[in-house]
Amino acid sequence: MTEPTRSAPPLSPENEAVIQLTRKDFVSDQEVRWCPGCGDYSILAQTQKIMPDFGYPKEKIVFISGIGCSGRLPYYMNTYGFHSIHGRAPTLATGLKAARPDLMVWVITGDGDALSIGGNHVLHSMRRNVDFTMVMFNNRIYGLTKGQASPTSEFGKRTKSTPLGSIDTPIMPLTVALAAEASFVARSVDTHTEHLQKTLERAGRHTGSSFVEVLQNCNIFNDGAWRDFTDREVRDDRMLVLEHGQPMIFGKDRDRGIRLRGLHPEVVQLGNGVTEDDLLVHDEQALEPYLALILSRMFWPDFPVPVGVLRAVPRPTHDQLIADQIRTAVASGGEGDLERALNSGETWTVD
């Protein structure tokens, strides 16, 4: 089984010259207005860097966002875009892909936008396998509205809206995406620029519903949300970089790993009878998401935090299934007549 990947639309005389693009071609004339030091700058930069590699003309690319700091990103991409309403970016993207399956569509969202008011739309776009790439900026806070607890804020987190500590269990975004049957699920970090580029490129090439969580820092209202395991000095020992077909090894000295004990993962030290053969081997292409679900629930400090692609599997896309149904209907009943359809059945005339 191989991962389904999206290829660029065929070249035509009109776009043959346009297709040779660089990062500068995707930088808009709008002033980038995020707080200095925000992780959003890195996500924007890596997104602009990878766009030429897809081979799509700018006119065939659309960025759709909801509300939040991440919602500004379409302004900074020199492509088509929508800055939509709170949580509804997946619905616009679903309609757009149904009407224009030839377009490359990206949904840009945040942990509040996607997992609170937008949670229902995220679930259904993933289960339908709508062919777009959703990038969720996760900073564990509502940054645009100045520091309230979000759906991913830690239990007990003190914020402006939870002065005595949050009493809500935080959502685990990757677990939600997998439960909704997303066909591509991955995680990266704003400051790990090379890894982020590769992850976004993999997601953009996948055909189907792609969900990428980017652990992102809000240095104003939740500074250091992920620093315990993402800082350069500690990340080798506290993060697990996933590689398809490879045993799950981590640590600065590559001397620790993850193995399965019954239904639960455990951290083991290599040596003293424990070898690489005892470790879990990552399989991002497994049709059943059991392993990916285990990984999605591993988190620091009990486990190293997994980053990379958790799942990448083939499934028919929403727009493909719509097109198949239309072809079947036309084959059995003809092209159809809208005026006749409107005037058939139980109709009446009002004088």
Image (cartoon, rainbow, N blue to C red):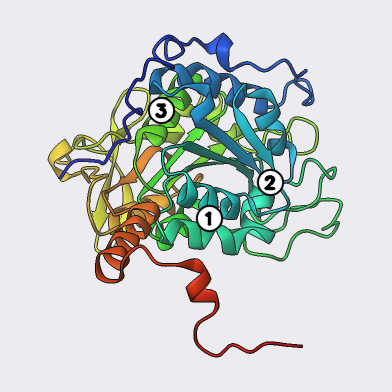
Q: Quadrant of residue 204?
A: top left
Which SS class for mark 3? Answer: helix
- Position above or below: 95 against 212: below
Q: Residue at x 54, y 57 (%)?
A: 122
Read off the residue under disc 1: 172
346 vs 280, nearest the viewer: 346
User: Rounded to the nearest whole Å, what is the CA distance between mark 3 and mark 1?
Assistant: 23 Å
Q: Secondary structure at mark 2?
A: loop
Image position of 149 (left or right of 338): right
Where residue 323 appears, as percent x and y from the top left, is 34, 55
Q: Which mark is residue 313?
A: none
**At 60% across and 51% down in the image, what residue appears?**
92
Give the residue pinned by disc 3: 201
| Dot 3 or dot 1, earlier in sequence | 1
Quadrant holding the N terminus: top left
- Discs 3/1, front: 3
Q: Which residue is mark 2?
A: 66
- How many angstroms separate mark 2 from mark 3 (CA)? 22 Å
Give, as a three-letter code, the residue at label 2: Gly
**Mark 2–mark 1 distance (CA, rounded to whole Å):** 20 Å
Q: Nearer the viewer, residue 16 or 1?
A: 16
Q: Quadrant of residue 276?
A: top left
Report the number of discs.
3
The correct choice, above or below, for 330 with respect to 238 in the image is below
Task: Name the side, left or right, on which 71 lies relative to 44.
Answer: right
